[in-house]
Amino acid sequence: MSHLACKGGSPVRTDRFPFWPIWGDEEIDNLTAVIKSGKWGCLHGTLSDEFEKKFAAYQDAKHGILVNSGTTALKIALTAAGIGAGDQVIVPAYTFIASASSIIEAGAVPVFADINPDTYNMDIDNAAELITDRTRAIMPVHFAGRPADMDAVRALAEKHQLVVIEDAAQAWGSQWRGSGVGALGDAGTFSFQSSKNINAGEGGIIITNDELIAKMARAHNNCGRSQDGQWYEHFYFGGNTRITELQSAVLMAQFGRYPEQMKIRQDNMNYLNEQLAEIAGIALMAQDERITSQSVHLFIFRYKKEFFAGVEKSLFIDAMRKEGIPTSPGYSIPLYKQPVFQKKAFGPRGRTIDLPIDYTAVFCPQTEKACYEEAIWFTQNVLLGTQEDMDDIVEAIDKIKTHADEL
């Protein structure tokens, strides 16, 4: 009989990893209080305002503006920072589509930069090569919760007078040189969607230290109203993209247990890094002493098939799952190869809206290698397990490598 579970052998484990979301009486009590108050909208209750202040302070920002999603947060942050029609915004090609679609929604043009294979964050040298006289902004993504190189980002932005919008959707509590990400550029955004480390089902927040950006973000989020105007005065273009008090009730409860959960994820990340460093063919993300805190939304490593008898990434992942380890291939396609960009289907019902970039000609080699050959993810709930759970991950990888010839 084969040793590997995918070939009929016994799996490394049959127990499940921690279930997500984690919730308790705090969520129920908060929700009950909001329901009974009758103040379900954020304009009438107090929890949304309280959470905005608490979260902004947690990330070292003066202002927080809650919105209905992380995608909305990005679009409003861009608009509030003055980015609009025809402006080019540099964004990494290996990230969730919202990073790029928000640029389209703002009327601007995404320009895709490659990633650094040692960090899976934007390759700043490549980004510098993409700057034109139309470039107005750069959007570093703190991917998986790992801060991007904000020293290099800010230096590039200062040199070319670019707006910096940080996509920190996965990086609550992450710090660069002791300062919270999201507050290091002109504005930053976070997500509270179901998979995220702080989860309200949906929701997002914009943080900034810029008074004007904060003012404009609040206006664009609230039907174009001004805090200084009357209720039915609309000074700017805007929609209703506000969050509800019900979501803020959940966020307050989730936030209360977050520091402890983040510490567990960080400890498990460090432990996995130590253990997996001993397995040839598992390439870990580079260490950087400037990263002083990391949320660990994902644990990522690069799979080198030549150390696993040439077995393709998809077969390795299937073998891991059969061993009882929930393993993700990550993004399966670079953003510029998504049908919506290949066809420029940015209009109603997929109607083509031409932009001055041929996305069919874009090629980011490290992004493609991540998508098709190397990237392996473990999600944040897996990182909430015990050290024994992490040992099972290591054992499964070692087992598959030892018996790769069976695949």
Image (cartoon, helix red, strand yellow):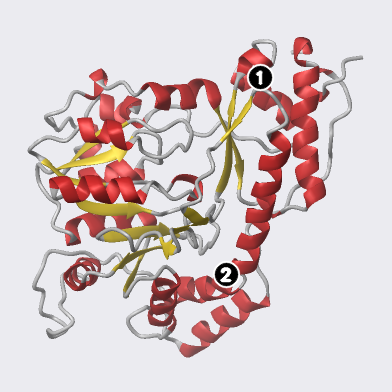
Query: Label 2's element?
Result: helix
Q: Quadrant of residue 56?
A: bottom left
Mark 1, residues whose alpha carbon is within 10 Å: few (<14), some, or many (≥20)? few
Residues at marks 1 and 2, CA–CA distance in whole angstroms: 36 Å
The residue lying at 36 percent from left, 78 percent from top is: 42
Please name the amino acid that badge 1 sits on.
Answer: Leu
Q: Residue furthest right?
A: 1
Quadrant containing the N terminus in the rendered view: top right
The residue lying at 51 percent from left, 76 percent from top is: 249
Query: With respect to residue 315, does 185 lie above or below?
Result: below
Q: Earlier in the sequence, mark 1 or mark 2?
A: 2
Q: Nearer the viewer, residue 334 or 146?
A: 146
Query: With respect to residue 325, does 30 lie above or below?
Result: below
Q: Is residue 368 left or right of residue 336?
A: right
Mark 2, residues whose alpha carbon is within 10 Å: few (<14), some, or many (≥20)? many
User: Residue 246: percent from the left, percent from the top?
Assistant: 48, 74
Quadrant containing the C terminus in the rendered view: top right
User: Residue 168: percent from the left, percent from the top?
Assistant: 40, 54
Q: Which mark is residue 254?
A: 2
- Total marks drawn? 2
The residue lying at 41 percent from left, 33 percent from top is: 116
Q: Which mark is residue 199?
A: none
Q: Quadrant of residue 229?
A: bottom left
Q: Nearer the viewer, residue 202 or 65?
A: 65
Residue 324 seen from this side? no
Q: Which mark is residue 315?
A: 1
User: Residue 287: percent from the left, percent from the top?
Assistant: 54, 43
Please name the amino acid that badge 2 sits on.
Answer: Gln
Query: With respect to residue 133, does 380 lie above or below?
Result: below
Residue 224 seen from this side? yes
The residue lying at 38 percent from left, 28 percent from top is: 334
